Image (cartoon, grey):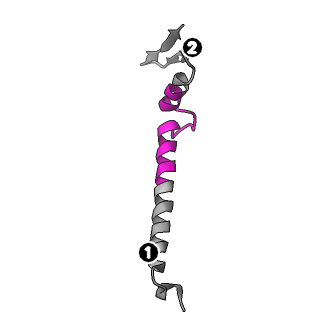
Amino acid sequence: MEWGAAPGAHAAFMAAAGLVLIAALLHESHRLAFRDQLTGLPGRRALEERLRSLGANYVIAMATSTISSPSTTSTAMTSATRC
């Protein structure tokens, strides 16, 4: 007897395929939310999650380098303190 002729075989196969598809979608959405697509570095959501896991006492400072070009100069600096 072929697997297609067995009762419920098609439904079981489709259910398994659906579960694999859902797992792949969840994995990809998590990767897109927590990783930068260009650099592969942790993104803003990963930073926020790590900040939440630090607890009540922390000091953190982040700085970016100055990017200079003839038309644009920008510098950004952020710091957060919770003691």
Residue found at x 45% / y 79%: 8
Query: Dot 1 lies on which element?
Result: helix
Q: Nearer the viewer, residue 9 or 49?
A: 9
Residue stretch rendered in magenta on the structure: 24-49
Q: Is residue 51 covered in magenta?
A: no
Total marks drawn? Answer: 2
Closer to the chain start, of discs 2 and 1, is 1
Compared with 43, 81 (above or below) is: above
Residue 75 locus on image (x, y percent): 48, 14
Q: Residue furthest left?
A: 71
Q: Is residue 37 covered in magenta?
A: yes
Q: Residue furthest top?
A: 83
Q: Identify the disc placed on residue 60.
A: 2
Q: Nearer the viewer, residue 44 or 71?
A: 44
Q: Identify the disc placed on residue 11.
A: 1
Secondary structure mostly seen in the magenta stretch: helix
Compared with 53, 28 (above or below) is: below
Q: Residues within 10 Å of mark 2 (few under 14, many from 20)?
A: few
Residue 78 locus on image (x, y percent): 49, 13
Q: Amino acid at mark 2?
A: Ile
